[in-house]
Image (tube, rainbow, N blue to C red):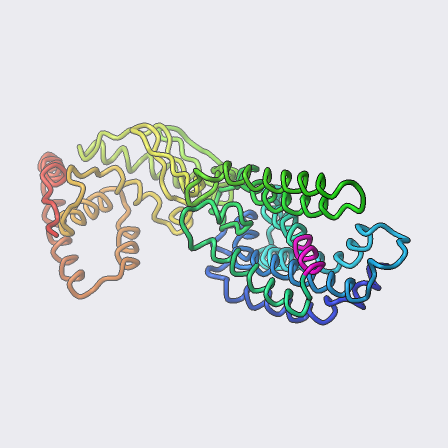
Amino acid sequence: MKFSTALRSGSVRWSAPIVLLLTSLYYVVGEKAPLSSYYHYAPTIVAEPLATLYALAYAVAAALACWESGRLKSARIWALAPARTRYRIAANVLAPVIVLSWLVLLVPPAVSLARSATMPSLDSLRLPLAAMAVAVAHAVLGFAVGCWVPRIIATPILAVADWIVIAFTRAVLPYWPRHVSGQFGTIGFGEVPELVSVAVPVLLAGGVAVGLMILWLPYGWRALRVVVAVAVAASGAFGAYRTAADWQAAPPLTAGNVAMKCAGSAPRMCVPEFNARYLPQIQRDTAKALRVLRDAGATSAQPRLITDGYVDGRLQKPSTDTVWRMMLTRPVPRGDAVYQVVVRALHFRCKETDVRTAHSAWLWGALRTGQEKAYQMRREQEGLTPTDRQVEKQVRADVTRVLAKPQAEQTEWIKRTLDTCEAKTP
């Protein structure tokens, strides 16, 4: 049977419009942020729409495969004289089903990539390729169920059960069920799932699928086939469980997979390549601001490197005295990156500082380094209540008085402000 014939005569002909409509709804409803916020990072753009579609793709593959299997059984295909192997017959009817499940997995990421004018990368293909392999395994499972249970009963039950089992692994503890299910999560900026993360669900589903295919062999001792099939399926399941048993909410990831651009020295600054046009001026202003603060006695910080920690995703690396990792991806084009460095350099002794003291130090630092506009923009972004505006007036009055004093007295004031801060009361 040709693919076109299987497509015209099978269940995909009437189910595809419904499935693709559901896919569109999931895509539209599941879009939580504008694509521009992903900065053309292909793995994140691909992973975001897929997060809500894995369960649908697997359920479609299993349910329609079950229907097609039952259709062959009701037509007594297996009782006819074999002109082709049963695997060839099964593959012919499953091909349209698998293609439809793959469309669920491929169309939404392709649309997101096109909308954001982003080229796919090899790293961005890991999740969809793994999900496509898992979808094939679910199709094999559904086909096996259809060989034994009447399709009119098995198909709806299998569709709902498959969707629930996969989708709800995101909400259960421990974490290993979600990692072995094929329900991959989203990928942060700079992150890429390690190969073991995408291999584990393929190992589980693939082991079960291969076991069912062995069990379906038309020759050999049945007892031996059962033993081998169970051994293969159990090995895949146990191997997947043992591998993922100790993983936390996020599977193994690599971070920092973003092209960076660096400039200057003392400090050297590094930002993602798409922000490179801002870098020379930002680096010069940062070096000047730190020099002003050191001369004023407000800090002794002399970082060798300031790099954008946003590219580290969830694998945040700690800063040191000489290497500062800061979230600069948004502040750089927004215009307040240097102010963020000023805030980082003004180190309070207390972990929690009252608002008036903290903002007095920050406003003083902003005025001394030419970052008053960035300070004000930051305050407006935080949302100023009437109480906040009253405090802001007091802060400006305090800082105005300080700036009118000689340099030595300003140095004494900023040291006292940073070293003798009052902890915020609960």
Q: Quadrant of residue 2?
A: bottom right
Using residue 27 as the reference point, say whether residue 77 is left or right of it. Answer: right
Q: 66 or 163, which lies in front? A: 66
Using residue 147 as the reference point, say whether residue 250 is left or right of it. Answer: left
**Rendered position, 6 above or below 402:** below
Name the residue at 51% across, 38% down. Answer: 257
Magenta run includes residue 144: yes
Using residue 21 as the reference point, say whether residue 256 is left or right of it. Answer: left
* Residue 384 drawn at (x, y percent): 23, 62
Quadrant containing the N terminus is: bottom right
Q: Quadrant of residue 13?
A: bottom right
Q: How many marks?
A: 0
Q: Quadrant of residue 368?
A: top left
* Residue 187 drawn at (x, y percent): 49, 47
Q: Main secondary structure of the magenta part?
A: helix
* Residue 240 drawn at (x, y percent): 54, 40
Q: 401 or 28, which lies in front? A: 28
* Residue 172 drawn at (x, y percent): 42, 53
Using residue 41 as the reference point, say whether residue 395 is left or right of it. Answer: left
**Rendered position, 239 above or below 381:** above
Magenta run includes residue 187: no
Name the residue at 10% across, 34% down. Answer: 408
Name the residue at 14% across, 45% down. Answer: 403
Q: Which residues are magenta?
A: 139-148
